[in-house]
Image (cartoon, coloured by chain):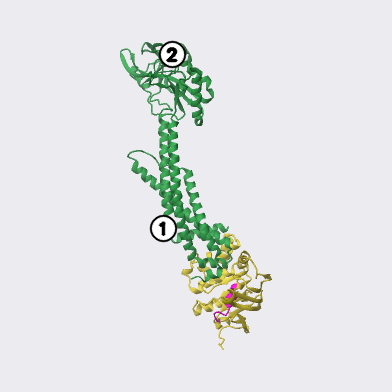
Chain colours: A yellow, B green
Amino acid sequence: MIKVEKLTKIYGKGEIAVRALHEVSFSVKAGDFVAIMGPSGSGKSTLMNILGCLDTPSSGTYILNGTDVSNMTDKELARIRNRKIGFIFQTFNLLPRLNALKNVEQPMIYRGVRKKQREEIAARVLAEVGLADRMHHRPNELSGGQRQRVAIARALVNEPDIVLADEPTGNLDSKSEQDILNILKGLNRKGITLVMVTHDYNVACHANRILHFMDGEIVREEILPEDGGGSIEMD
Amino acid sequence: MKWIEYIRLAFTEILHNKMRTFLTLLGIIIGIGAVMIIIFVVHGAEVFIMTELDNLVPLDLIEVAGRWDYDRQDLMARETLEDIYYLQEKVKKDIRSITAMYQTDLELIYQGKNYDADIIATLPSYQNFYKMSFSEGHFFTDLDLENQNPVVVLGYDIARNLFPQGDALGKKINIYGPYTVIGVLAEDYHSPLFPEENNDNRAFIPLTAYERYFGVKNYFSVMIRAADMDNILAAEAKIIEALDEKYGLVEGESRFQTYNISEGLNQITIVKIVLMVLLSGVASITLLVAGIGIMNIMLVIITERTREIGLRKALGASRKDILAQFIIESIFLCLLGGLLGIGLGYIGSKLVLAYARDFINIEVAVPFWSVLLSLGFTCGVGLFFGIYPAARAAKLDPIEALQYE
């Protein structure tokens, strides 16, 4: 699904150049659930931006579902983001003036789906994340966990190849956190490919494997047992 | 499809912060409102003047008369019945109808009863020219004219006063000799050409009968209706030309002149054009100032919604999508201002004219073109001043935009 080879990202030039990623290579198979862990400044955010096609690498290749997206134009990248990638953010990033249904419809507007069909799909996906009775509420009328579920629904409506979650539970209380992680695991069991950035090991343990980042490089890959998750001790 | 969604989004945003929207649009509202008040009032006045004029004098009426000679204290020429026939042939294509008359006050006498009447000595063509209607009898004929027959058509009041029994037809009344009554006008008859003119005290006799008694010294007025409302000037020129051909010039100038109300209307049109030019100047400055205000607020809006822009890009919006969304928002913002401005203009002009009601009774008239034009201009302002902020939004880097606090 994802194949990254010698991915390097350098910000700035000459003396002040900062190397955020250094020849990172890894791959994610379809249906996998990968967590990316590391302290801030380790390059995990840069990697997420490149994986999400919001940024392009300085060198190296990024192949998403068989397509090389390392050197695409703005317009092509927008299309890829729309059709092939679903985003889940730490701060939900819902549009405050629109209700849950409308928020979930937004990606389909850019795909050119007709209104009626948009509403049907959005309602169905919202029901899948357990918000059937909250569709017409605006974000400020929803709890944190509910907001993140709206955002998850929004990430899923265009049936992306991969869903990228950036600290999806960072702004949630522990109960909502468990909720969201269960939903993500449920999605993964249904075959959705997930890449999740987190700095919380307990959260990362819900994935199938963890890529540990440090100074722009993968320092360790950790494969977790099948029934992973829950109470894994820190080392 | 996207467009409809952008319009919906624009309305959601515009209506969300009503106070700010209103303050932003105040410039456009007042500007458009002021311009609209002037247009609505001026147009109302124009409609008023045209209606009033048309009630007084038909707009296509041309009067022809000799010019006044100040040295001799007389007209330079007098048309005659012959000239009527001459013009009828000569400028046939340019005139719809022609008639002529002498007008004088005379006393009518019947069996010792007197009545001061307004005598009109005219041609049979007068009947169609003025579209007369009768309660009994008929108008005189070409034969009456040719034979100088002493026949008379009475206005309704005259007939009722002299013949209370209603048996006027066939009776002989004395004007300056015996005249036989052959017709009586309809009660309260007003010519559609001159709705304000009362005909109840008028009596009509053949022009030739009058001339036999009084000669041709009196003022002979010739009335013509132009064939084509839009070619009145050309018709006037041809009439003068035809008469000059017959009468010759005096010191290189015609002995005749024509009168038509549209000369006055031209002046009104000029005033209107000057007003419109001034007005469009004022409107342009207003819209420029308002447009800068719009640009400013759009830049504020885009800064406020930087995260939204970042998010939309992450969800797959292209630069074009973002550009379109914000330009549409800017256009609809201005359009709303335009609509409110037109509303303000309508209410304002009603108030202005209500205040003026004591002097003049003008109704507000809304010319359709002015509404379209002002909406068009406000759209243009929204588009023009929305492009720069929208382009800035479109160029935002999605990562930076998403991290914007």
- Marks 1,2: beta carbons within 8 A: no
Left or right: residue B280 compared with residue A116: left
Q: Tell which circle, 1 or 2, labels the residue nearer the N-terminal end.
A: 1
Q: Badge 2: few (under 14), some or many (20 or more) residues near its Cα, within 10 Å?
A: many
Kind of residue at badge 2: Thr
Q: Quadrant of the N terminus of chain B?
A: bottom right
For marks 1 and 2, give the CA distance: 77 Å
Q: Decide: is A31 above or below B222.
A: below
Q: Is residue A211 left or right of residue B10?
A: right
Q: Residues within 10 Å of mark 1 (few under 14, many from 20)?
A: few
Front position in the image: A86 or B270: B270
Extent of the magenta region = A39-49
Q: Which mark is residue B208?
A: 2
**Residue A220 place in picture, x, y as percent:** 62, 84
Q: Secondary structure at mark 2?
A: helix
Query: Is residue A48 highlighted in magenta?
Result: yes
Relative height, residue B195 to residue B404 (above, below): above
| Residue B141 seen from this side | no
Are the residues under badges 1 and 2 in a single subunit?
yes
Question: What kind of residue is marked 1?
Answer: Leu
Give the chain of mark 2. B
The x and y percentages for residue B148 are 44, 11
Q: Is residue B251 magenta?
A: no
Whether residue B111 can be seen here = yes
Q: Residue furthest right?
A: A66
Q: Which residue is mark 1?
A: B23
Q: Which of A149 and B207 lies nearest the eye of the viewer? A: B207
Viewer-side label of 1, 2:
1
Q: How many marks?
A: 2
